Amino acid sequence: MTPPSAPPPYPSSSTAWYVTGLLTLIGIFSYMDRYILSLLIEPIKQALALTDFQIGLLIGPAFILLYVIFGLPFGWIADRFNRRIMVSVAVAFWSVMTALCGLADRFWLLFVARASVGVGEATQGPAGVSLIGDLFPKETRPKAIAFWLSSSSLGAGSTYLLGGLALAAILATPPVVLPIVGELAAWQTAFMVVGLPGVIVAALFFLTVKEPVRRDRADSRLFSFSDAMKYVVRHWRPFLAAAFASWGSTLIGAGSFWAPPLFLRTWGWDATTTGVAIGTVLLCTGIGFTNLAGWLAAYGVRRGVVHAPYFVMWLGIVMTMVFLGSFSLMPTPELGVALFALGMAGMAMTAGASVTAIVAITPNRLRGQLSALSFLVMNLLGAQIGPPAVGLATDLLGDPAHLRYGWTITCVATGLVANLGLLWGFRHYRAEAARMAQSDS
């Protein structure tokens, strides 16, 4: 009998962290492309004569629709083909599509361009999870994943902080005039300024990253999508348990796209003031608490608590529900910012541990597909619902100034469901994480 071959060695620490750093930079650009719409809600609404519900459709379904449809095929591709090429092409594509959002002059054109951005960004989740899984051993993997996931808060924070200042600068300069298209409004120019630099990042990734060796362990066969679904069905309880926190955080996080207009309508802050405040909060919480989640999860795993990521997610979703659910009700914007910061810290902790929690109960050869499946479920039931839900609740309340109440209702209801799900699923997740830890060296 042929003895089993030893697993291939991991890349050097410097190589692994370089690739992770580039993936994080790509993540930052993806979230900037995603969040720039939030800062431009009011001028877009006025220019295209849209309702809050239509804005919610642009924030959520327009982006998420194709994002989730293409997520699973891209997860299948990430488990089989060259991820370096996959990521490079995708980044270039969604960057160009973001720039094309700036050429929209009616609702359906902006909807189509926004959906195309979602197609490209559907690659980064499964490809990133698959790459990092092959770059780091399980003891340090939570820190690397958390660092990568901090790109969400870093990207959103950079959008608000720099985007608010850039928008003010764009408004202060003469309008951009393009051949055939003609004069662009400030919000249209902003889309182009944010989108096009991503093409450079795509080229950098393609030229400097080498595809890592896949760590197949004892099972080197390729899993089909049918195999992946059968695995999830057999282990549905731990996967559903992990999904509750991710779903709650995603729904609330998607709803937070409404934060800039909420500050404007509730406390009268302009786009620049709001952008600086929210951007600073997201940058601080993104760097600090997403990585804190990774360190806490890694510490727990080293101490033998293989379900530590689950605990970290749970703490984060409690903080998210309590503080983000109440910030909009504060009497002053300063108190609102303080509670918003605590809520975003909780969301960052949930995000920082969520992917690690999925990886901890997933075989290596299924990580691309099952991470894509988890992103699909989170976005279908989270990002797809959150923004329209807040907008619809506000429209039903009959006054745009009641956005603060529409937000609170959505946030608290979501948080309660997520916490009940986490309570139900804890023992199932703990048992599966312990079983997988025995086979992961």
Image (tube, rainbow, N blue to C red):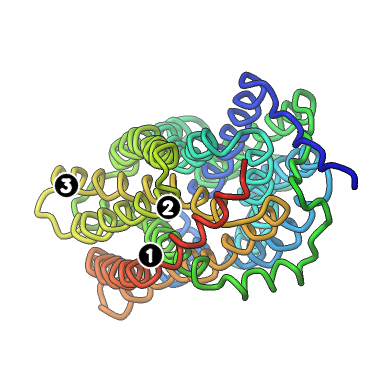
Label 1: state its secondary structure: helix
Mark 2: few, some, or many residues within 10 Å (few <14, many ≥20)?
Answer: many
Asked if residue 166 lies left or right of residue 122, the reply is left
Compute the Cα span from label 1 to label 3. 37 Å
Instruction: From this view, report whether residue 92 is shown above or below residue 358.
Output: above
Compute the Cα span from label 2 to label 1. 9 Å
Q: What residue is disc 1 on?
A: 426
- The quadrant in which residue 376 appears is bottom right
Kindly identify the amino acid type of the residue bearing the numbered disc 1.
Answer: Phe
User: Do residues under tags 2 and 3 come within 8 Å of each other at their CB atoms?
Assistant: no
Q: What residue is disc 2 on?
A: 307
Label 2: state its secondary structure: loop
Label of residue 333 in the image: 3
Give the mark nearer the N terminus: 1 vs 3. Answer: 3
Give the residue at x 71% y 62%.
Answer: 70
Asked if residue 126 lies left or right of residue 307, the reply is right
Q: Nearer the viewer, residue 133 or 106?
A: 133
Label 3: state its secondary structure: helix
Is residue 74 among what the camera can see? yes
Q: Position of residue 1 (x, y in %)?
A: 90, 47
- Say which of marks 1 and 3 sits in front: 1
